[in-house]
Structure formats: C-alpha cells, structure tokens
Image: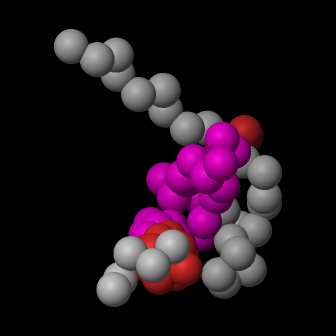
C-alpha cells in the first residue's frame, strides 16, 4: 500500500494569481508542476492547464519520434 499523497497548500504556491484569469488563486485549485505548487482561481483553470500540458507533451513526443525517424 502506497502512502497517502501530501496535500498541496496554498501558502506553498509560487503564484498568487491564476495564470489563465488573473484572479486570486484558490486552495481547491492547486497542482504540482516541476516540483512546485501552482495555483489557479478554480478547478476548471487547473484542469485546463493539465490538458494543455498533456497536449504539449504529446506534441513534443511526436516531434522527437519524427526526428529520430521512428515514423517511417
């Protein structure tokens, strides 16, 4: 059984305003990115960030595969 995840704390966030909306961040809208707590104004903005990161990572992986000649 793995240990329970450590809850993210708003006071640990590297930002005070949401990168999408510019509004103040909320305690229920935090995520961990590259080892840092990042806050958003609402869960929808946090989830939008996660989707954007996923799409970006997928695009990078596809580009790396194409550059390595793996898509032949």
Q: Is residue 7 above or below residue 54?
A: above
**The N terminus - image quarter:** top left
Compared across the picture, whether 56 is left or right of 16 comes to left
Highlighted range, magenta: 26-55
**The C terminus - image quarter:** bottom left
Percent x, y for residue 8? 55, 38
Residue 52 sits inside the magenta stretch: yes
Residue that extends furthest to the left in the rendered view of this protein? 1
The colouring scheme, among rainbow, by chain, secondary structure or one colour, is secondary structure
Percent x, y for residue 56? 52, 77
Instruction: Identify the residue at horizontal 48%, vertical 53% (top origin).
Output: 28
Q: Is residue 57 above or below residue 62?
A: above
Instruction: Identify the residue at horizontal 78%, vertical 51% (top origin).
Output: 14
Percent x, y for residue 48? 47, 77
Residue 48 shows up from this direction: no
**Residue 26 position by quadrant:** bottom right
Instruction: Identify the residue at horizontal 75%, vertical 68% (top origin).
Output: 17
Compared across the picture, whether 38 is left or right of 56 comes to right
- Could you say which is closer to the camera, residue 22 or residue 50? 50
Number of numbered callouts drawn: 0
Residue 19 shows up from this direction: yes
Residue 28 sits inside the magenta stretch: yes
Instruction: Identify the residue at horizontal 45%, vertical 78% (top origin).
Output: 69
**Residue 9 position by quadrant:** top right
């Amino acid at each position: 059984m793995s240990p329970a995840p450590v809850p993210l704390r708003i006071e640990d966030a590297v930002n005070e305003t949401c990168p999408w909306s510019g509004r103040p961040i909320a305690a229920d809208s935090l995520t961990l990115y590259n080892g840092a707590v990042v806050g958003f104004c609402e869960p929808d903005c946090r989830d939008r960030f996660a989707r954007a990161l996923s799409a970006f990572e997928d695009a990078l992986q596809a580009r790396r595969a194409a550059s390595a000649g793996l898509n032949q």
